[in-house]
Amino acid sequence: MGTTPERGGVTVEFETRVRRLREEAGLTQAELADRVDVTRQTILYVEKGEYNPSLELAWRIAREFDARVEDVFDLPDEPQS
């Protein structure tokens, strides 16, 4: 689980399933990055929960795994303060 720096003054924790889905699909970080048009480092940080992807990037990643965004990125119901 990672955290975004801040969202409206509140730190937001989120969990990402990108690494598990990528490994199950037999893709490297570089291959996934090429498919969603970002750098390998971006995928690394997304997997570690150190980068909060834009809605567009989250959608592109989810689409690569034939999944919904909410199945790949899980935000808590209430932000942590």
Image (tube, helix red, strand yellow):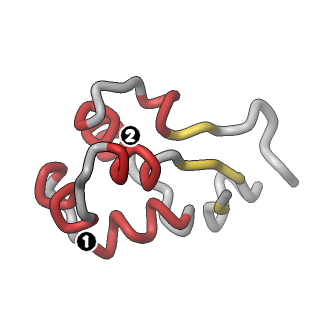
Q: Are marks 1 and 2 in contact (CB under 8 Å)?
A: no
- Tell which residue pokes out farthest to the bottom in this image: 41
The residue nearer to you, when weighing 42 against 25, is 25
- Tell which residue pokes out farthest to the right in this image: 81
The residue positioned 28% from the left and 26% from the top of the image is 66
In which quadrant of the rendered image does the N terminus lie?
Answer: bottom right
**Helix, strand or loop for disc 2:** helix
Relative horizontal placement of residue 80, taking residue 3 as reference (left or right): right
Say which label, 1 or 2, has the lower sequence index: 1
User: What residue type is disc 1 on?
Assistant: Arg
The residue where tag 1 is placed is: 40
Tally the numbered discs: 2
Task: Specify the label residue 55 is tagged with.
Answer: 2
**Helix, strand or loop for disc 1:** helix
> Can you give x and y, in whole percent of width and height, for residue 63 in the image?
26, 31
The residue positioned 60% from the left and 37% from the top of the image is 74
> Can you give x and y, in whole percent of width and height, for residue 76 in the image?
73, 37
Reply above or below: 42 against 37.
below
The residue positioned 66% from the left and 62% from the top of the image is 3
Q: Quadrant of residue 50?
A: bottom right
User: What residue type is disc 2 on?
Assistant: Leu
Relative horizontal placement of residue 48, taking residue 38 as reference (left or right): right
> Can you give x and y, in whole percent of width and height, for residue 81 in the image?
87, 54
Reply above or below: 6 against 62.
below
